[in-house]
Amino acid sequence: MTTNLATYSVVLTYSAMAVYVIAFISFALDMAKRSGQVAAGAGAAAAAPAERTVATVQGGTVVLEKVDADRGRSSGGGTKFERVGMAMTILALVLHIGATILRGIAADRVPWGNMFEFSLTGTALITLIFLLVQFWQNLKFLGVFITGLTIILLGIATVNYWVPVVPLQPALQSYWLVIHVFVAIAGTGFFALGAGLAVAQLVQTYRQGRPVSKQLRFMETLPDAERLEVLTYRVLLVGFVLWTFTLIAGAIWAERAWGRYWGWDTKEVWTFIIWVVYAGYIHARATRGWRGARSSWLALIGFAAVMFNFSVVNVFFKGLHSYSGL
């Protein structure tokens, strides 16, 4: 029974990856479509006046008023490719969550006891956070980044990290596994979203102040660089709070498991390095006035440290946190 459930989990994982690919292509086509719409809009704007005069009657007096020609135009609900991309992302996430649940049932525990399971759950949570954030702010333009990242991480996990279902090591048999690791995964999800926003801000900053170019015209449909910087800061602030809790919870768990709060284990050190980088980002932006490209590069350095911690430290460095299962 356990073997069958694990097999079904793998099948659902590959199915989710296939649907993620469709979503990625749809989001990429959406960017191309946006570029075409911007080009067409620029041509129409050049051919038509920016203002028009409208006569209105106020208290029996005719008043001539200049009105912006574009006032009242609806930006629409996105292109059809964007809507297809969002629908496919939701469908892929349903399959993805199904694969994660089946893996957990097969293992009779939470599905993040080794690198494969951590990757499976982590990428699902990244996508879920991306979808939930849409209720707060329209960040659908990050769809191509999030689905692309998910495809890459899931592909690496299924090819290189897959292992059969095995019992947890004694040190992991604690309720802190549920709390500590889940919050760490959630923090990573917000860091990924912030990295996507930082990339968009860098591109937007590069474009602004330069002659109009036909390249990357879809960026004109995105928020400006200042707005992207504010969004990046807010998203990373949430991720930083979650990562701070991860660091504290990890120390408490270490004391329960090994009798000390801190032991300079490689995983502990890199978790702290990530915290320091993002703390530096928040401090520099809030007190030192770092704005623009500098803050974005620091945010990307932080996410690079997260990816290094996930891909290199977990696999190649030996220590008390060597639970990759490889």
Image: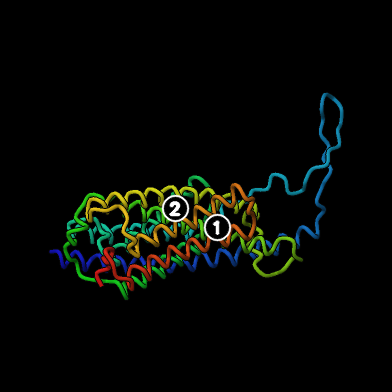
**Front residue of 285 and 276:** 276
Q: Which of the 4 quarters of the picture holds residue 254? A: bottom left
Dot 1 or dot 2, earlier in sequence: 2
Residue at the extreme top:
59
Q: Which of the 4 quarters of the picture holds residue 154? A: bottom left
**Front residue of 301 and 106:** 301
Q: Which mark is residue 92?
A: none
**Front residue of 213 and 284:** 284
Picture residue at 36% right of the left edge, 54% below the top: 184
On the question of residue 280 being in view, the answer is yes
Asked if the residue at tag 2 contacts the one at tag 1, i.e. Cβ–Cβ closer than 8 Å, the answer is no
Q: Amino acid at mark 1?
A: Leu
Describe the element under mark 2 as helix, strand or loop: helix
Residue at the extreme left:
1
Q: Which of the 4 quarters of the picture holds residue 62? A: top right
For the rendered model, the colour scheme is rainbow
**Front residue of 287 and 157:** 287
Categorize mark 2 by other alpha carbons within 10 Å: few (<14), some (14-19), many (20+).
some
* Residue 286 percent coordinates (x, y): 59, 47
* Residue 210 percent coordinates (x, y): 75, 65
Q: CA distance from mark 1 to mark 2?
A: 15 Å
For the C terminus, the image quarter is bottom left
Q: Amino acid at mark 2?
A: Leu
Categorize mark 1 by other alpha carbons within 10 Å: few (<14), some (14-19), many (20+).
many
Of badges 1 and 2, the one in the foreground is: 1
On the question of residue 95 being in view, the answer is no
Q: Residue 189 vs residue 55: left or right?
A: left
Residue located beneath label 1 in the image: 197
Q: Which mark is residue 131?
A: 2
Relative to 64, is 131 above or below? below
